[in-house]
Image (spheres, coloured by chain):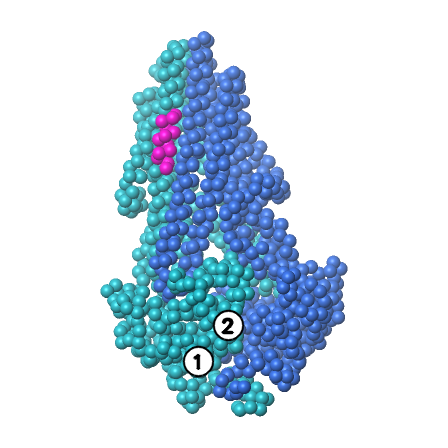
Amino acid sequence: MSIFTQLMWFFRANKRLYIYGLSFLFLTEISQMVSPALLGSFTDRVIAREVTPEILLLYAGGILFFAILMYGFRYAWITNIFQGSALLEKTLRQQLFDHYMQMDTTFYQRHRTGDLMAHASNDLSAIQRVASGGILMLVDSLVIIVFTVISMIFVVDWRLTLIGVLPLPLLVIGVRYLSPKIREAFTASQEAFSELSNKSQESIAGIKAIKTLGQESQDVQAFEKEVTKTIKINKRVALIDSLFGPMATVIMTISYVIMMTYGGSLVVSNEITIGQLVSFATYLGLLVWPMFGLGQLFNVLERGNASYMRVQDILMEKSAIVEDIAGIDTLAQGNIKIDIESFVYPDDSDTKNALKNVHIDIKSGETLGIVGRVGSGKTTLLKLLLRQFDHYEGSIKIGNIDIKSYRFESYLRTIGYVAQENFLFSDTVANNIRFADVNKTQENVELAAKKAAFHEDVLKFPERYETEVGEHGVSLSGGQKQRLAIARALIINPEILILDDALSAVDARTEKQILSALKAERQEKTTIIAAHRMSSVMNADKIIVFEQGEIIESGTHAELMLKQGWYAQMYKQQQLVTTLVSKLDGQGG
Amino acid sequence: MVEKNSSVWAKSIPIKEQLRVIVTLIKMAKPFRKMFFTALAIGGIFALLQAAAPRIITYYMNTYLHGNDHVTWTIMISFAVIVAIIRLGQAVADAFNAYYFTVAAEYALEDIRVKVFRKLHTLGMRFFDQVPAGSLVTRVNNDTASLADFWRFFMQLTFAVMSMIGAYIGMLTVSVSATLLMLVVVPFIIASVIIYQRFSSSLFRHMRERLSSLNAKIAESITGIDVIQEFYQEERFKKEFDRVNGEYFNARFKMVKADALLLEPMIDLLLGGATVLVLWYFGVLSMSTAVAAGAIYAFTTYLSNIFGPLESIMSLFSPFQEGLVSGYRVLDILDNDTYAPAQNPDADQVISNGKVEFKHVNFSYDDEHPILKDLSFVANPGETVALVGHTGSGKSSTINTLMRFYDFQSGEILIDDHDIRDIKLDNLRKQMGLVLQEPFMFFGDVTSNIAMYDDTITDEQVKHAAEFVGASHFINRLDDQYHAEIQEGGSGFSAGEKQLISFARTIIQDPKILILDEATANIDTETEATIQQSLKKMRQNRTTLIIAHRLSTIQDANLILVLDNGEVVERGTHEELLAQRGQYYDLYRLQGVDNNTSDN
């Protein structure tokens, strides 16, 4: 029941819906009691042959009147209550979505996309069921049971009522008993289903590997094995599920038997009339659903409660990144000064420093190159710069102001970030490029694409800039995705452009083209390039080399070459090729 | 073929198509007809018993309670026992009916699920390149699951019809003329069903469409959260979501209103009207002759036996529609004819030496834009041929045709001087080892990923293969070594490690021909060295075709083909090509570090 209290904020905010809805539901239940009473008393008059045209008109008119009245009542309560539950789902979904938009990287590492989706669909529909089916069952059970029993006592006979109704609570108990069993079986069935999904997901994703190895038939066999398992589990669900209806029938039978014997004896001894017995039978029928509902109500509430808890848990999580609301709201500008004493990833079991003693000065307008092997700390540093993590020791300042002192908008607007793998939205090429500013014109879009050496590619697409990308559109190659992402960052002409291994899938010729475009266009602006290929960074004003979270070398290309360290070694390795060419070439070297 | 809009709910399926889907699905359930018919028969028994109970109670009322005097305890108890037995019979029939039907439906849908899965494996790479993997997974699993709704509807439908027939028969035994009067209700029932069906189907479709775009929006926003936050677009996304969310709410509220107007309240109204008819008939009758006491009871009970099931089939319309759409999508796959290229019917050749020859091969993905133009080359047994060129130059297409992923249009591909289509497919697969650019890891452990489904491969052989490719090094460092678990997609393993495992997987088959699509992913320098060494070893005594991204790895190739727009523009050895100073030379120089060395 506590779920109703927890949802009180919503019921209160939508008082009107619930006052109307519950009133009409109540009226519907009350009106339902009238029909059996009329039927019973009419039956008596028919048997006694007292029916006159007036009486007939009265009864028929009465039943018809109530039927029409109930139609109106039913329409009113259904629209109000179900509108409420749909509104509850909508409200919670928006809350969740807004929350998702606010959350930090750690949150997304903790929760997988599938789980977050499940909260926004399955959990919400379980909560929504509390506000529709739950309320209906609650009111139904309370009102119908109370009023039916009262009607039975007054219209028929209190002794018959007492004994006749006695078996019905068994139904509640039975439903309560079977429900955990069905839930258990159902959970197993869901698990089997998701295993099946995983299996087919793997087969489809790995179709090329399977074809290559010629293992189609073995794969089908493996799938069939999973299917056999699923069938077995689902048969158990079907078995338990098929017991609910019969259980209700069995328990109702007990009541009917009592009605026929004890009720019959009361008729014989003239204590009640046959008409009253007819009414009693009808009332008994009315009780089946509320009893059944009462048993299910607990499940609906339990599930709703669990789902609401899960949703609340998610909503309670706070982003570790807190915006300084009173912060600076002019765009960040100026020299970048990075002084990080240490940084450790959250939730990391080994408290190994991801970054240690990192001190870098980048003058406004300079280009910084960052190299180092996979996992050495390049991307980590960039993540801090993007304010994905705030809990490092030390400071990062832009224009001598701590980056944490800026408003998000004014800070993030100054940065254009391109990752190695970039997410594109299911939208047109043009809209993906103007992602950060929907007001950019087609010219702006094309210009950005040209700078990113992507324009020529777009012209080859079926609908050029209006071509859809993403799952349902054209599929782009890795290099095309990277170049689109570069255009997306360039369109806002950011103060600071960050390319995080963003040229890895671009061929050498295109890389050169992009780098020289950047050089020409961004003389006044800061650029940070992290890369594996030394050719990407060798012309930077400053290059730093990371190793296990620390800077082991830094300087210009020429300086680093003199040092004969990691950079020089890697450079030479990649250089070997060029030298070969040069030899054959006979020019320079 | 590419679906612009994934939601089939966007358009309605024509009635003719719907009928085709229904007929086909029913035909597909044929192997399980025994179970379905058993369920139906039991349902018939249930309907009979359901009709019998009120009849007996009516008889009891009329005969023994009416006159007030000639009822005895024995009679009372025996009637109670009879009614109890009937009702218990009903309960048993109900349970068996539900169980049999659900299980039959389960078998039928799992059968279709396996058929879809099996079918997928007969389709060619063309199909998989065009249809997003996500939508295929949905079809194999979710769509087939929705077929349960399809079957439940049919169960309810037959059940409702039987209940109605049973109820009318029961009524007939009470009063023929009153029963005839009750037939007046039938047109109303039919009309309400038709009206509701018409309204609900379009509203439901609309609602489903909104729901799928809503879910797509959430999924996309979660996956793209980094980009959204980096470019500070949260507010825009919240606003857009508010709109999509509101649209779904509106669609749903319309559905609620339609249900409130036409479903349960309407059925109850009709039931009320029918009850009035009963009253009227027996009331008027009683004015002229005596009416049996149980008649009114019998008729009102039978009426609820008619209207109750009616309501439940009507509320199943929407799920049925869902099942129908799913059925449509499932059949769409089963009817798809983008088959994998077939071998010649009497293909019986086997690969013994591993000579590969392309003779004037032309190939296009869409019969419109040629991808490979007059491609010819020979790789003699044991030789290495490298393919070089920009993205889209035809390197991958060459491999797609050689692997029989796609059929080529004209020319010849010869292996050991036999037409490739004359070679037994399983032999072709075994003798041609393709190493993919992005190695695919299957759920399981290291051993199962190397041996795959082949039971004849021993653990010794797995170890040997791993040692051969230089993977044993890192495998031995794993906690469970060769039985270390591999998660979906191989998370936890580096790109290089995955590559080494896939090398072992290929080499354990001991193929005569090795086809390498060189990895471009960033692999750390140490593993990179192991990989290069391993590649060298693997290539020994094997014909090798290699798509090279880094030219440094193919300097010892016997033949290098430079492809441009599907044509061979240069061919020769490394030295020959460099001397030509053509495209290869340019490519080669660009891959080195440029600028400060030489500039023309």
The label on residue B37 is none
Residue at horizontal 35%, vertical 63%? B232
| Rendering coords of residue B129 (x, y %) | 58, 60
Q: Where is residue B518 in the image (x, y as percent from the top left)?
A: 57, 73
> Residue tagged by mark 1?
A537
Question: Which residue type carries mark 2?
Answer: Ala
Q: Say which residue appears at 61% left-offset and 38% top-offset.
A: B34
Give the residue type at disc 1: Val
Give the quarter of the image for residue B228. bottom left
Does residue B234 lie above or below A279 as drawn?
Answer: below
Label 2: how many Cα within 10 Å (few below 14, some 14–19, many 20+): many
Q: Which chain is blue?
A: B
Image quadrant holding the N terminus of chain A, namely top left
Q: Earlier in the sequence, mark 2 or mark 1?
A: 2
**B535 relative to B205 in the view: left or right:** right
Q: Which residue lies furthest to the front in this view?
A: A443
Give the residue drawn at x 35%, y 23%.
Answer: A34
Tell me, yes or no, if residue A413 can be seen here.
Answer: yes
